[in-house]
Every structure is written in structure tokens, then in C-alpha cells.
Amino acid sequence: MTARRSSRMLTVALTSLVAAPLLAVALPAVSAQAESQTVASIARAEVGGTCGDYNCQYSNAWCAEFTRWVWNKAGANTSGISAAAVSIYQYGKNKGTLHSTPQVGDAVLYDRDGNLNDGEADHVNIVVAVSGDSIQTVGGNESGGVRFREWFNWKTNSSPVGAGRALAFIGPAGLAETPETPVSQGGDLYHAIRDAAGSWTSFQPLNGANGASFFNATEESIAATPDGSTQTLATGKDGNLYHTARYPDGTWQGWNRMDGVGSAASFAAQGQSLAGMPNGDAQSMSIGNDGKVYHNTRFKNGTWQGWNQVGDWQAKKVAAAGLPDGSMQSLIVGNDGNVYHNVRKTDGTWQGWYATAGAGTAPTFAASNIAIAGLPNGDAQLLAVGNDGNTWHNIRKADGTWQGWSRMDGANGAATFAASSVAITGLPNGDAQLLAVGNDGKAWHNIRNAAGQWQGWKTTGMGAHKVSLTGTPDGAAQMLVTRN
């Protein structure tokens, strides 16, 4: 945050002596710029950066320099922007990019006294997402570094960093049509962590295969193993299945294309899921390009068993979860649209596919999307998008009996929660955490605690097509989304 200076020398160095109008009133509509997802992608990728990464002049006042650095990297004309936050206001006036409502890629200026007549602004950061009157931002010199800030209503609330109200939005001028910096696209994979205390990291893009900046996927799954690693499968834009691992220190193994059935060089997947097992293995259930269901195991030592067909069933969707006893439970949506359940026992044999009973007295349960999680007490919790488009929850208890399907409450008092993609995981404390893509195209989060009480749906703010998550031994949850 750009703090006000009592020192006259610093004030002269860091402020532009502009006669700014009172910004508490509406600004004129001045040549609003188009949204810049390029700027947003660059800013998001810098979360965690520090002053020295941006050649800043002042270690306690570099928010404007960070904004300039991001815009410059995106290809904008940044002439006229100094270390003073207020210089960006003058820049907007000079370049014709000053406007009164936010757009992605804008700089947003904050000031505690509500105007810029004194030639000062308290802080500036970058708008990386907009939803109605709410914005997400990334800014430099926030808690000593570059930080992501969750949704807040800029019209009614002060800035999340205590810098006063949002007073003006300024777009970058002169962005190239085809910037040199790679730009994230719909379908790129993003990763975030919710720690055991409930704090979130921002969603960060995963690097792609062979040095690519992003990994574009049609579907993803993630599973934790007891050593604190997570294993990830993703179906790439070539239709083939790829694997990577995230180690406990936060580094990534890198993507490797999965071998196919028999001697095939790749495995083309129509759907896939991954289950972490208590012995350190990870088991995958996938739907091949023939529509049939296949099983594979990645052993603790990193080698793979190879693909084996599970019966002669065909499926549209698949899900898998490891249980504390070493068994693995799986769900599929069959070609008839109904949900079927199976158990792979600890000796590697299969129980066989059985249709799950429907809600009430219905003999079957039809769904378009499914997820399953193993809990420490031996229960398995199921999440599904029913044929009514809403989310439903079920429990298969450790003794093999079923609780039955219950339609879930919606967000903010709504009776139902409509979703297109769902994920669920168990935590060491007996809680279950859920992710779902709501009908607003955003990823939403929920918790069912060990006593059976629900937290309620809360938006993550991240736009998504598909979601996946897993609980790690330290009580955190790691999440993957394919962005929209």
C-alpha cells in the first residue's frame, strides 16, 4: 500500500501535482477500454512477488510500480507512470482511459479522504475479475508482497487493504493485439489450496507440457497420498491422458503422457478419476475412447500397473475414491443415464456394478455428473448432479447400507443448488469438502462437518468449467479447476 508521507522530500518525489476533481461524484464516461485478460493473467502469476522483482525505488511504496510493470509486460504504453499511485490517474486522463466502472485489466485507485485534489492516492492495484459491483484484485506492496484479494463490493466497501474507497478505474493504453506474453485461455488448469485454518491461496495456472505456459484440459482429477503429495490426471486438448505430481514442498514433477492399453503409446480418455490409497498408491478409473471403463494403479514407487478393462460396461462419467481399509469404491453414469456403484476389494477383485437406488421410492438415480469421497470412518459420501440439474448428496455407510439421496440446499437461502460439475473429498477430521460449478459459471465451495452439519455454499470467485479437489493429511484441501 502506498502510505501518505510526512516527509516533504518523499511527497515531492512520489506525488504528481495534478488538480484532480472530487472523485466521490460519478466520473464522465471517458473512452473505456476493452477488458484485458492478458493483464489479469500476468498479475495473477505474480502473486507472491516482492519489491525487488520489479526494480522498485521505494521498498514501502511500490504499488504503482507493480501496476506499471504488469501493464508493460502485457504490451501497454506506460509512459507517464511514476512511483506515485496518483500518476496513474493523470495517465488515465492523458490517454483517455479513465472511467467510472471496473473492467478486467484496469488499475483501481483508492484514497482515504475520498478525493485526489491534494495530488495523492493511497493505493493502486489491478482488477483481475468483475462480477456486478464486486471485483477481485492483485496488487503490489500488500502485506509486503504481491497479493490476491477476494471479491469485495467496490461501491459500498473500503478496499480490503485499508486504503480507503475505490475512486477511479484506469485502463492500460496501447495494448498490442497479439502480446508476446502467453495468455491464459478457457480450459487452462488452475490450482489453489485451502489450508486447515480456512485460508485460501489464489488460483494459479499450472504450467503445461514441454515448456508451455499453461495446460489446457477438458477434464482433471486430483488425489492425495499419505506422504503429502498429490497426483493429478488431466485429459489434454489432444484427447490423451497426462499425469503430474505435486510434492509436499510445493514443486511439481511435470506432465507425462500416459501409456495406453497394451503397447499403445497413449490413452485417449473420455473421462477419468483418481483415488489416493492409504498404502501410498493411486488408482485411476478412466473411460477409454471405446466408451468402456478401465482401471490402472500408480504404485508408491512411481511405476504403473497398466490399464485393465473393468467388465464390459460402458459409461459416460466415472468417479473413484480410496477407503481406509485399502479398498476403492467407484461410480459410473451408465449409458442409460443412471448411477452405478462398484467396489474394488483389497485383493483386487471386484464386487460388480449395482444401480444406486433413487430418491424416495425411485428404483434408480439418473445423473449427469458424479463424485465420491472416502471418509476416515469408512463411509463413502457421494455427490451428483441429478437429472433436474441440482446437486444431490448420499452416503454409503461403512457397513454397506445407504443413507439415501438428499437434494442439497442452495446458496444464500435458495432451495436448491444447480451445478454442472461437482467434486467431493474427505478430510482427516471427518469433514467433507465440496466444489461445484454453479449456474453462474463460478466454482463454489461447501463443507459438511463430521457431525453432519453444512457450512453452506460460498463462491470462490473463480470461473470454471470443471472442478476437482482432494484432502491432504495436514487437513488442507487442494483444488483444480479448468477455467472458463
Image (cartoon, grey):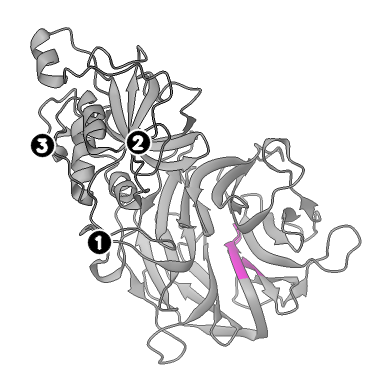
> Foreground residue, 293 or 114?
114
Depth check, mark 1 against mark 3: the one in front is 1
Q: Main secondary structure of the magenta part?
A: strand
Judge whether residue 322 is colored magenta: yes
Q: Disc 3 residue type?
A: Asn
Q: Disc 2 residue type?
A: Val
The kind of secondary structure element at disc 1 is loop
CA–CA distance in space, label 2 to label 3: 32 Å
> Foreground residue, 36 or 222?
36
Q: Could you tell me if the residues under marks 1 and 3 are in contact, i.e. CB atoms within 8 Å?
A: no
Task: For label 1, count other residues whose C-alpha is less than 10 Å away and answer few (under 14), some (14-19) or many (20+).
Answer: few
Residue 370 at least partly seen: yes
Relative to 146, is 441 above or below?
Answer: below
Can you tell which mark lies on residue 55? Answer: 3
Can you tell which mark lies on residue 454? Answer: none
122 lies left or right of 134: left
Q: Of the two numbered discs 1 and 2 on the same chain, state the one appearing first in sequence.
A: 2
The kind of secondary structure element at disc 2 is loop
The residue segment tinted magenta is: 318-331
459 lies left or right of 81: right
- Spot occupied by residue 263 in the image (x, y as percentages of width and height): 40, 92
**Residue at label 1?**
178
